[in-house]
Amino acid sequence: MNETSLDIHKLLKSVVAYKASDLHLVSRSEPQIRIDGRLVALNLPVLDGRMIEEMAYSLLTEKQKKTFEEHNELDFSIVIPEVGRFRANYYKTMEDIACAFRIIPIAIPSLDDLNAKKIFKEIIKREKGLILVTGPTGSGKSTTLAAMLNEINMNEARHIITVEDPVEFVHTNKKALFSHRNIGTDTSSFATALKYAMREDPDVILIGEMRDKETITAALTAAETGHLVFGTLHTNSAPQTINRIIDVFAGDEQPQVRAQLSTSLVAVISQALLPKIGGGRIAAQEIMITNPAIANLIREDKVHQLYSQMQLNQQGTSMTTQTQEIVEFLRKKLVSKETALQFSNKPDELLRIISTM
């Protein structure tokens, strides 16, 4: 492999050039990028561990090298001048170093850029409450959240604290004031950052990932005590999100958590990115808005009835199911039937509808 192809900056430039989302460097494979959700190998020689280590370490500080060598895992973000901002993860595979880079747009999209529904602009005007954006890895959660915070930034003078691992989108202060905090360098954990956030006079808090009981507890408390809290989970539907939060707690704690959720939850937006016919991807978003009926079902442990409730009076509630979104994509011939079924969170329901179309 020649010296030119060992240049990590040129590889990262290729992510931008091909409009890809990710770059993977793994030994015994050529470099690969992800375009519209699919991995594509670059026409370059196969990498070995030494080559990857040389490229990977060229981007690290001494402190980061030490952290990686101690834990064999490292998350960080980096700006490559005139290329872009990337979220990076270094890990080990068969004792060799491997890397995954995800591009983070420097220009933060607006809700209008994303063709977001009107309800998005309405829910972010709330003074307090919990707004969750959920979905699998790579489903565009961070982009949706960034656009929502951008909307607040353009219109309201609020102090916004983001706690992420690592910080992804970096906002320029417009009307709002941003305090971005990196896990590991600015604070030790999500739970610790949230504990001290209450003393930092926030109006809005973004939690990069609600991954444990302490973080979820702190998020619920912050949402109850006058803060607008945004968070993410790796769940595929609104009802599954509610179950995931409640299941983190012991049985005797669950009634209290259900009560807190019923009063503090504003919305759950579950999304998946579907490859479009002809290239590109489109977000299918399931939207559950907490109204008295939804709150009552959560409080009374009737989560299994949430889905049918989401289908009622949708003109008045602005709710939608993922199936309805995907059916609309099919009608407009934006996605194939195979893609629709592959990404559906209720494939049996979708198949029944498709058979009548």
Image (cartoon, helix red, strand yellow):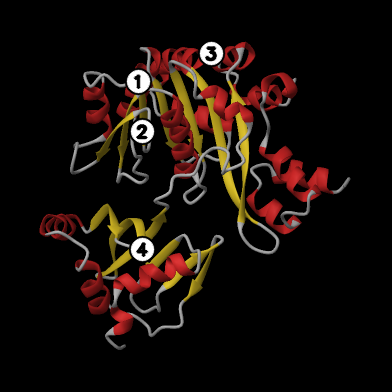
- Judge whether residue 312 can be spotted in this image: no
Could you say where residue 337 lies in the image, as x and y percent from the top left?
75, 55
Alpha carbon separation for disc pair 1 and 4: 33 Å
In this rendering, the label closer to the viewer, 2 or 4: 4
- The residue beneath circle 2 is 207
Name which of mark 3 and mark 4 comes first in the sequence. Answer: 4
Q: Secondary structure at mark 1?
A: loop
Residue sticking out furthest to the bottom = 2
- The residue beneath circle 4 is 83
- The residue beneath circle 1 is 203
- Which quadrant of the structure image shows residue 78? bottom left
In this rendering, the label closer to the viewer, 1 or 2: 1
Alpha carbon separation for disc pair 3 and 4: 49 Å
Alpha carbon separation for disc pair 1 and 2: 13 Å
Q: Nearer the viewer, residue 256 or 335?
A: 335
Q: Secondary structure at mark 4?
A: loop
Q: Are marks 1 and 4 in contact (CB under 8 Å)?
A: no
Indicate which disc residue 4 carries.
none
Could you say where residue 66 lies in the image, as x and y percent from the top left?
12, 58
Name which of mark 2 and mark 4 comes first in the sequence. Answer: 4
Which residue is found at the position 42% from the left and 13% from the top? 256
Alpha carbon separation for disc pair 2 and 4: 27 Å
Amino acid type for the residue under numbered disc 2:
Ile
- Residue density around tag 2, few if under 14, some if 14–19, many if 20 or more, within 10 Å: many
Q: Nearer the viewer, residue 168 or 50?
A: 168
- The residue beneath circle 3 is 299
Could you say where residue 306 lies in the image, as x and y percent from the top left?
64, 24
Q: Secondary structure at mark 3?
A: helix
Alpha carbon separation for disc pair 1 and 3: 26 Å
